[in-house]
Image (tube, rainbow, N blue to C red):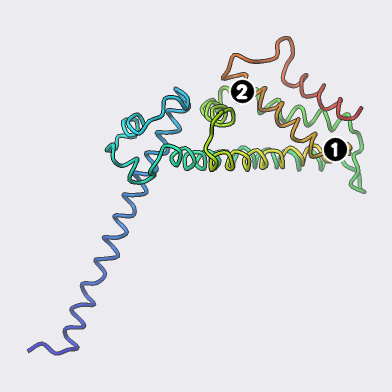
Amino acid sequence: MVSSSGAGENFSAASPRKPAATNKKAEKREIAKAKILNATLDLIARKGLAALSHRSIASEAGVQLAMTTYYFGTIDNILVAAFDEYCKSMQPVNEDLRRAQHELLSRSVDSNGALKDRTQYIEGVAEVFAQLIDTGPTARLRQLRIECQYLYEQHPSAALAEKIHGYNDWLSGIAREFIEPLGTDAPELDAQMFMWMVQCLEFSAVTSVGIDGASSRQVLLRMLRGMLV
């Protein structure tokens, strides 16, 4: 006869299998979801938002058609989740901008924290963003195509519109760090205007719209100088 303590020991020995099986299932789920989101972003970069469907995403991801609905439900939900992934990919780019601003500011202020030379600072800001814009087409062409598609989507869902608004607020916050030292009378508005100009110059690499006859640096310098008038 097996004692009650022996039965308990047998049960304890077998129980670890369940968490292991659960973890394996969760891992497969996350892998499948990642494939779907990466495939969605790849399709957006190559063909645009209009190319998205459950079938096209599943085919691109190499998963069963039912998985896109099972994990995300609707195309709108996939778009929101994919945009979150895109935002994560932009974190290193935006952190580099913040570091560049801190380095530029440290070189440009006196012991009281005031700008020593606003003209020199403006030229530094224009140079930082001109480098970002001019290296974009080679270093992050995929990101630019994805961002352009999302930001110019005319009929986003309410959830996606909220995400895009938050993303633009994030970018404007970074721009404001560059603009505030200039001491303009409307730093928040000026930061938004400046970021929109940067985006337009970046998107010229992936659209047919651009400014002829001037470099990115020249355009940004003219805009920044205009803020001081």
Q: Quick one: label 1, few (<14), some, or many (20+) residues within 10 Å? A: few
Judging by the rendered image, the residue that carries numbered circle 1 is 186
Tag on residue 194?
A: none
Q: Amino acid at mark 1?
A: Ala
The percent position of residue 170, horizontal first and vertical second, equals 66, 42
In the image, 123: left or right of 57?
A: right
Tag on residue 203?
A: 2
Which residue: 56% across, 23% down?
138
The percent position of residue 195, horizontal first and vertical second, equals 71, 32
CA gap between label 1 and label 2 equals 26 Å
Query: Which element type, helix, strand or loop, lies under badge 1?
Result: loop
The percent position of residue 151, horizontal first and vertical second, equals 59, 31
Q: Amino acid at mark 2?
A: Phe
Decide which of tag 1 and tag 2 comes sooner along the chain. 1
Outermost residue to the left: 1
Query: Which element type, helix, strand or loop, lies under badge 2?
Result: helix
Which residue: 34% across, 52% down?
27
Using the image, determine if residue 48 lies above or below residue 76. Answer: above
Using the image, determine if residue 167 lies above or below residue 11. Answer: above
Q: Quadrant of residue 215?
A: top right
Which residue: 63% across, 43% down?
166
